[in-house]
Image (cartoon, grey):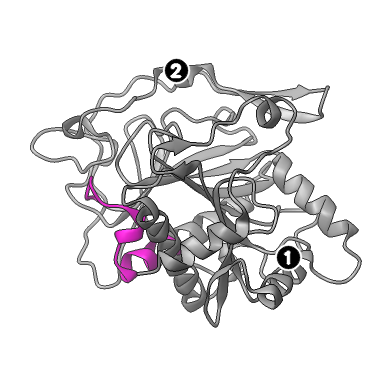
Amino acid sequence: MQTPSQPRRARLADGREILYFDDAGSAVGPPPADPRALPDREPPAELRWDRLVEEWVIVAGHRQARTYLPAASECPLCPSRDGRHSEIPADDYDVVVFENRFPSLPAASPGATPRGRCDVVVYSSDHDASFSGLSEERLRTIGAAWAQRTAELSVEPGVASVFVFENRGVEIGVTLHHPHGQIYAYPFVPPRLERMLNAARAHADGCLGCALLADELADGDRVVAATDHAVAYVPEAARWPFELHVVPRRHVPDLAALDDAERGRLVSLEADMLGRLDRLFGVPAPYMAGWLQAPVGDGRDLVHLRLQIASPRRAADKLKYLAGSESLAGAWINDIRPEEAAARLRDAGS
């Protein structure tokens, strides 16, 4: 595992941690203090075991009170300026990570073994920015932040898996428009990663992720873009109308295992793919983008790092909804052939 660069650290008024990651060459001082008088933290979320399907379910009733689609003038992720104090005390910043005020995962009381953590990752002080439009320097800073948090959270007691992701668009359920993502440090291995592990264990000949990548490159129909370090393709059995996997050519378990150059190119390829989604229909695409990383413990050597991007937009004026077959039976139906989706994404290149 690489040793990512370290951020500037501080605490918010209620004790939550905040970390500032700076672009190369930024002239910065010590982190400013948080002058707010915040209430005590909300009661923690809880984990419940669903015996019927043997999966963990997170119950987080306190999140009903979280901020919901505020006006830009009231955005909690914008810098603190002109007498208005946000979640970020600085009057400007590059990339900021802080503990979510309304976390989805249960955390133990101070001094006890933590059970999970939810971080917010703010990509820019510009409220109207988007991931695909950020500079290469900023993308490198975000990648470094992801790697640092992955490495640090992976050694926390009780953490089993670290998931880095972004949701964009009200169609997805986003509650804040400011460009940001999240990091969940789960106290369990989430179901999709568990199924990936089971498939990897059953694959008799080396890494399943490497084999899938080789198959996609040999076929070629679903490959959208390929560089010396990574490949973006539509998976053969894509579930979503427009779904992409971005996979490093080198077998690595997580973002922290990449060197700075590899990670920078990989994050740039992600931005390229997100830009193509926007160009498909000429409007900002709703999407989910998440890095599926190896678990912290057993099976770490089996998982090949990959980014999964999925958009529910199937036409300019149509969305895919998860109805009975998908939501209740777990059997997905895709309205667009993956080969057609790949061709359209190739044509949407800049």
Q: Residue furthest left?
A: 82
Percent x, y of residue 271:
41, 62
Label 1 or label 2, whichever lies nearer to me, is 1
Q: Residue furthest bottom?
A: 228
- Residue range in magenta is 125-144
Q: Residue at x 40, y 34 (%)?
A: 174
**N-terminal-most mark, 1 or 2:** 2
**What amino acid is labelled 2 in the image?**
Gln
Mark 1 — residue?
209
The dot on residue 64 is 2
Q: Nearer the viewer, residue 306 or 310?
A: 310
Relative to 291, say whether 215 is above or below: below
Q: Residue at x 70, y 77 (%)?
A: 218
Q: CA distance from mark 1 to mark 2?
A: 38 Å
Percent x, y of residue 260:
48, 75
**What amino acid is labelled 1 in the image?**
Gly
- In the rendered structure, the answer to whether residue 115 lies left or right of residue 100 reads right
